Amino acid sequence: MASMAKMYGTAVRDEIKLFTAWPIGTNISLGDVGFLTRHGKLFERRTNLANFDTTFGVKKGTTTTDFDITLARDFETRFKAAGNAPLAGSSLLTTDVGVAIGYGEGSSVVVRAHTVESSIDDLQKLEADLIRVSTDAGSRWHSNFVVVTTVYESTGTTIILSSGKKTNLDIKARADVAIPFDLADVNVGLAAASGSSKFISALARTNFVPFFQAHHIAGRYWGPLRLELYG
């Protein structure tokens, strides 16, 4: 699991310059305070700004932000409609609607996500608040703390991670769904039918934060203290 976590966090960071939490589905909120691990840059939550008597306003997006990440060798998706003959090497039956997903050996990360962005609306105020808190010995502010300042809340997210040998994953959808369908659509009733090798999947999940941005206080050793985007 640790290698999967590192692989996932690193892939997300490299591809879209955002951070993620582990396990998949871990609750992340604006104003959360914690550490980003060195390997994989995964978030370890410790507390929230509310516990430092710091308040903030929230700016919420009005449009959807979509993400599409595929880092996999020999990646293949084969959709199947109800009534069609079973796919070779797949467990999907003639009556099933679904998709057979396959990829070659090695680590694989596949993400399809529909999200709505929310962020702390006044970073100037946040900077002043964090400088005050971080220089107060009684606050117990850690020099390596980061603050979650933007979250991407899922309205439908599918994440498939694989490590090791060649992998096949069969996913069923509702019987009345047309193909090809959106792998992140919460309305198609996705469920894993079978899989080979070592994989972790979250299928068309909502009400969690797959990605976020963080800021931290920089300048402790040179220059004035200032708020900076982490990473």
Image (cartoon, helix red, strand yellow):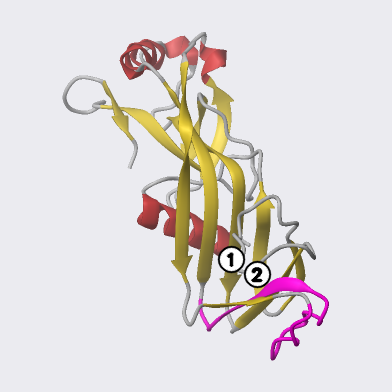
Classify the position of the N terminus by image quarter. Answer: bottom right
Q: For numbered disc 1, what is the local secondary structure?
A: strand
Residue 192 lies in what quarter of the image?
bottom right
Q: Amino acid at mark 2?
A: Phe
Q: Is residue 166 visible?
A: yes
x then y, percent, for residue 124: 30, 15
Residue drawn at point x = 53 percent, y = 42 percent: 115
The answer to whether marks 1 and 2 mark residues whose Cβ atoms lie closer than 8 Å is yes
Magenta-drawn segment: 83-106
Vertical side of 230 occupied by 20: above or below:
below
Q: Residue furthest bottom?
A: 88
Residue drawn at point x = 72 percent, y = 62 percent: 177
Tell which of 230 and 68 is nearer to you: 68
Residue drawn at point x = 35 percent, y = 11 percent: 125
Q: Amino acid at mark 1?
A: Leu
x then y, percent, for residue 88: 69, 91
x then y, percent, for residue 174: 78, 62
> Does the magenta run of residues contain 131?
no
Distance from disc 1 to disc 2, alpha carbons, whole Å, reads 5 Å
Circle on res. 199 = 2
x then y, percent, for residue 169: 67, 75
Circle on res. 161 = 1
Tell which of 156 and 84 is nearer to you: 84
Residue drawn at point x = 59 percent, y = 71 percent: 162
- Drawn side of residue 175 relative to residue 140, left or right: right
- Drawn side of residue 99 relative to residue 138, left or right: right
Classify the position of the C terminus by image quarter. Answer: top left
Residue 44 lies in what quarter of the image?
top right
Tell which of 154 and 22 is nearer to you: 154
Earlier sequence position, callout 1 versus callout 2: 1
Q: Identify the main secondary structure in magenta.
A: loop
